[in-house]
Image (cartoon, rainbow, N blue to C red):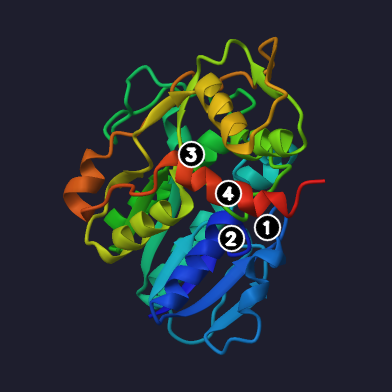
Amino acid sequence: MRVLITGAAGFLGSHLCDRFLAEGHEVIGMDNLITGNTDNIAHLAGRSDFTFIRYDVTHYIYIEGPVDAVLHFASPASPIDYLNYPIQTLKVGSLGTHNALGLAKAKGARFLLASTSEVYGDPLVHPQHEDYPGNVDAIGPRGVYDEAKRFAEAITMAYHRTHGVDTRIARIFNTYGPRMRLDDGRVVPNFIGQALRGEPLTVYGDGSQTRSFCYVSDLIEGIYRLLMSDYNLPVNIGNPSEMSILQFAELVNRLTANPAGIVFKDDLRIKGDPQTRQPDITRARAILGWEPVVDLPHGLEMTIAYFKERVR
């Protein structure tokens, strides 16, 4: 296939480029580099089967020649990024998705949207299954990301139902691994960076809030299987193994042999930050035959090795 991957220089987008190239496909990567980094795809430079285009997908997208699949991964994804770029986040979720869908329609291509567990907001149902409509504060600070993705899902289904575009929607839960940015504000790089510098890990509140962490190779496998499936409704892709932030901090300290321990601070989290997050992956298991295989200690060891070369 010849595939377009938007957000190709980002954490997930760059790993997707690697996977599709490894499967023998031709990849066109597109990114405006607001939060992406060409270092993530530097190893692909010079390949005849990879093309990178620096471009903002909130403008009309033109690709010469055939396109068999469009994977729309362009968007700021961490709280620190979408709070710094709130309008850009809303535009890439709305205008960017519209343009990517328009390209898929024009080319007769399959389309996959990178959605998010954040469409569930601060959930009142646990674990979260795809039929749960969510508990989202549209005008809170996180709304710029949550509502951008909810709109993106709505327009994706509209193109499917109205124009017959062959669409997929992946609701991605917390994912970690090499190529995350140390300064992106998410808990995995935050904790690993602090631990490798020999600093105490900062836990907000009492650390009882929970997350479920999926290693990037597992996530990419789920995305690939979803694109190759014939299922059009949303599918949760994530690791259902849940743990508290305090337990996670303790694990990071143990794996890095960090003696500095943990410090607790008043709850300074962003308003609306979910207290629980755990995917119900029944649908992914049944439809894709997929579930995570990399356990958290092993995944963290590989991630820590990556960050060791980048911590100052």
Q: Secondary structure at mark 2?
A: loop
**Can you identify the residue that label 3 sits on?**
174
The answer to whether mark 3 and mark 1 are in CB contact below 8 A is: no
Dots 2 and 1: beta carbons under 8 Å? yes
Mark 4 touches mark 3? (CB < 8 Å): no
Mark 2–mark 1 Cα distance, whole angstroms, equals 7 Å
Residue at image coords 53%, 85%: 64
Q: Nearer the viewer, mark 3 or mark 1?
A: 3
Mark 2 crowd level (few <14, some 14–19, many ≥20, 10 Å Cα) = many
Q: Is residue 291 above or below residue 110?
A: above
Quadrant for residue 48, please give it.
bottom right
- The residue shown at (53%, 43%) is 300
Point out the tag, 2 or 3, that comes first from the N-terminus: 2
Could you tell me the amino acid type at mark 3?
Answer: Asn
Residue identifier under label 4: 303
Q: Which mark is residue 7?
A: 2
Above or below, 219 relative to 4: above
The answer to which of 291 and 115 lies nearer the viewer is 291
For marks 4 and 1, give the CA distance: 18 Å
Amino acid type for the residue under numbered disc 1: Gly
Q: Mark yes or no: residue 137 visible.
A: no
- Secondary structure category for the residue under label 4: helix
Dot 4 or dot 3: first in sequence order is: 3
Q: Residue at x 56, y 20 (%)?
A: 272
| Distance (Cα) linking label 3 and label 1 | 18 Å
Instruction: Name the residue: 21% across, 46% down.
Output: 285
Q: Is 131 situated above or below 108?
A: above
Res. 163 image quadrant: bottom left
Q: Is residue 239 visible?
A: yes
